[in-house]
Image: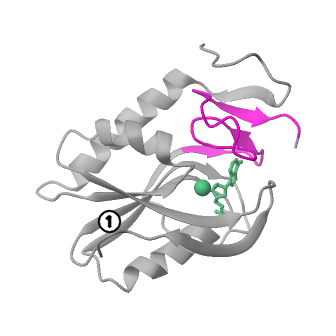
Amino acid sequence: MSNLFPPSSDVGEILISESEIASRVAELGAQIANDHEGSTPILVAILKGSVVFVADLIRAVPGPVEVDFMAVSSYGSGVKSSGVVKIIKDLDRNVTGRDVILVEDIIDSGLTVQYLLKHFESQRPASLKICTLLLREDESRPDMKIDYVGFELPPAFVIGYGLDVDQAYRNLPYIARYANE
Ligand code: IMP
Ligand code: MG
């Protein structure tokens, strides 16, 4: 297992290893291509947490695919949801008539994704799907269809593979528990 910097007491137990992530991402890429034969889906990654995931995911799609980015803020600098979603960077073009897949690093309360679904529905895409690397187990989350899920996660705050705490640890190649929650 590679380590990018000296061990930190913030980095807890490794929950999903580098190789487990790689094989699941390969499966998701194949599934996305399979589900979109004859079309070029746009993977819309939500910055910044999804950037590592989407970089691997587009290379795992054996067929035409586009990538674009949005930036939203849903959390402050801490580890708790504020419930407030604000679009900081929108797509350059609208997605009317296109097959859109929102790519998230993790779905927790679901507020971010629900807000973005509404935002995109108004542009009348041909289809609108959700792909998340991680889905936190949460009974209280409102019902929503999540088309592609990498891994389900117990209710622990996690870091690595794009996920941060105060902008740190996005470069860890694995998903680890944040030890100082
Ligand atoms: P939601 O709107 O509550 O679903 O929150 C989703 C967003 O919160 C994700 O895109 C992450 O940016 C952030 N987030 C939620 N849980 C974690 C975590 O365990 N580690 C790092 N970021 C998280
Ligand atoms: Mg995020």
Q: Position of residue 86 (x, y in %)?
A: 61, 74
Query: Picture quarter containing residue 54?
Result: top left
What secondary structure is marked by label 1?
strand
Residue at image point 75% right, 47% down? 166
Looking at the rendered structure, the kind of residue marked 1 is Val
Residue at image point 52% right, 26% down? 20
- Residue 2 as seen in the image, left or right of residue 61: right
- Overall secondary structure of the magenta section: loop
Q: Is residue 121 magenta?
A: no
Asked if 6 appears above or below 126 in the picture, the reply is above
Looking at the picture, tell me which residue is in the foreground, 105 or 92. Answer: 92
Task: Give the position of the C terminus as an image quadrant.
Answer: top right
Q: Position of residue 168 (x, y in %)?
A: 71, 38
- Residue 64 as seen in the image, left or right of residue 104: left
Asked if 172 appears above or below 122 in the picture, the reply is above
Q: Position of residue 150 (x, y in %)?
A: 50, 43
* Residue bounds of the magenta highlight: 151-180
Task: Give the position of the N terminus as an image quadrant.
Answer: top right
Residue at image point 39% right, 40% down? 55
Taking the image as four quarters, which one is ligand 2 found in?
bottom right
Query: Picture quarter containing residue 96?
Result: bottom left
In this orientation, does residue 131 appear? yes
Visual colour scheme: one colour
Residue at image point 77% right, 70% down? 82
Label 1 sits on residue: 100
